[in-house]
Amino acid sequence: MIMKVYGATLSPMVRKVVVALEMKGLEYELDPVIPFHTPEGFEKISPLKRIPALEDGEVKLADSTIICEYLEDRYPDVALYPTDPVLKAKARWFEEYADTVLMKVTAEGLYFERVVKPLLGMETNEEKVQKNLRDNMPSTLQYMESVMPENGFLLGESLMMADIAIGSNFINAGYAGFDPDAAQYPLFAAYLQRVKAHPAFQLRMKEDAKFINKE
Amino acid sequence: MIMKVYGATLSPMVRKVVVALEMKGLEYELDPVIPFHTPEGFEKISPLKRIPALEDGEVKLADSTIICEYLEDRYPDVALYPTDPVLKAKARWFEEYADTVLMKVTAEGLYFERVVKPLLGMETNEEKVQKNLRDNMPSTLQYMESVMPENGFLLGESLMMADIAIGSNFINAGYAGFDPDAAQYPLFAAYLQRVKAHPAFQLRMKEDAKFINKE
């Protein structure tokens, strides 16, 4: 039975899962469930009714990180986490940082305000966006810059979950009109270019373009 | 070199790590760092200056779940996660639920208000506590009751990280004067008794008693 991913792929968390599936060469179908309008009985798949969720035969899982760790454990052929315990912990830290800090700074305080709200007929709170860009974004970018390699990706030569999680969030920041300044954050800006140039992300961004930037 | 855990063990997240270390029979020392008053340079160990953090020789890690997964990967002799990918995903879900939902309902909205604030010379917002107990606690307890086994622990016969994470949060709820009603939530109340009766938790609660319930 083909796997099923619940959630709209414009969500950075859903995109994480979809990129992981594509990189692992696993077939899936998408059910673009929208938060707050989840179908009846959705709590049997995702107890908190959040997206993304995954159905893999009898297995039902919620939470992007739990889904991606499951995919790695069950379908390890294309590795998206390092196997060394120390490097794996480092990879998990970056993924957690993306799922919590970046989710707040690039998604909730920026993409949600500037892109999602207008789509829902709500008004952007640009004051909130500006406050977020002033109070939260600089320390976030400074931290990102401080951990960036000069070449390749965070855990080495290949794109892994840590890069997918970080890239996925900054793609949404870009959709909301924000990209890190390459003069101020040269390593991070160059890294993001490499992440976005990866075929798995190119495919996602091509799909995204069907839904946004339509003005 | 002996491992070092940063954070006060009254924190449910720090307790998780300490119980994991004790169950794995790993030696450690505690540095009871308090959030908001972290020592100079603490961001080199915990980039967001949060507790718990762990130093294991050259390895520096933050985030209770990342630390516990690292301990499992690096010191697997006493297993605290299942090895089967499906059960491991289930275990991770319960741990994530504890670290997010329970952390809000039992720690932020209850223990922090009734225990931590008075210790800091601040006033308990009992209205906030009552609202939390009314709006958030029932659905949380209903969910817990719905997933509970009649015997043993969540993943089988032995206490594992999922149980440690859930138990650790409800110990703090107990310190704040709240325990699930055994008539309404019989499976969960009995489960919590089993978790708290475990020697690793008995030891922790004995240590906790030095700091609280001193009135």
Image (cartoon, coloured by chain):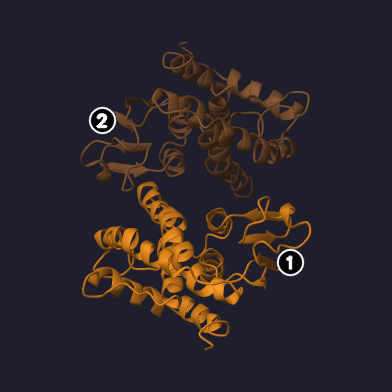
Chain colours: A brown, B orange
User: Disc 2 sits on a residue from what chain?
Assistant: A
Residue A166, position as x, y percentages in the image: 58, 34
For the residues marked 2 and 1, what is the alpha-carbon distance in whole angstroms?
A: 50 Å
Q: Is residue B79 visible?
A: no
Label 1, residues with CA under 10 Å away: few <14, some 14-19, many ≥20: few
Considering only vertical position in the picture, is B189 above or below B51?
below
- Point out the residue furthest to the bottom here: B215
- Three-letter amino acid code at the position of disc 1: Met
Residue A59, position as x, y percentages in the image: 30, 42
- Point out the residue furthest to the top here: A215
- Going 31% across and 48% down the picture, which residue do you hit? A47
- Going 55% across and 75% down the picture, which residue do you hit? B118
Q: Is residue A97 visible?
A: yes
Q: Are marks 2 and 1 on the same chain?
A: no
Considering only vertical position in the picture, is A39 above or below A183?
below
Quarter of the figure with residue A149: top right
Q: Return the residue at label 1.
A: B1
Residue A173: numbered disc: none
Residue placed most toward the observer, A29 or B58:
A29
Q: Is residue A74 left or right of residue A103?
A: left
Residue B36, position as x, y percentages in the image: 67, 61
Q: Return the residue at label 2.
A: A1
Quarter of the figure with residue A211: top left
What secondary structure is found at the residue carrying circle 2? loop
Q: Is residue B65 left or right of residue B5?
A: left
Picture mark count: 2
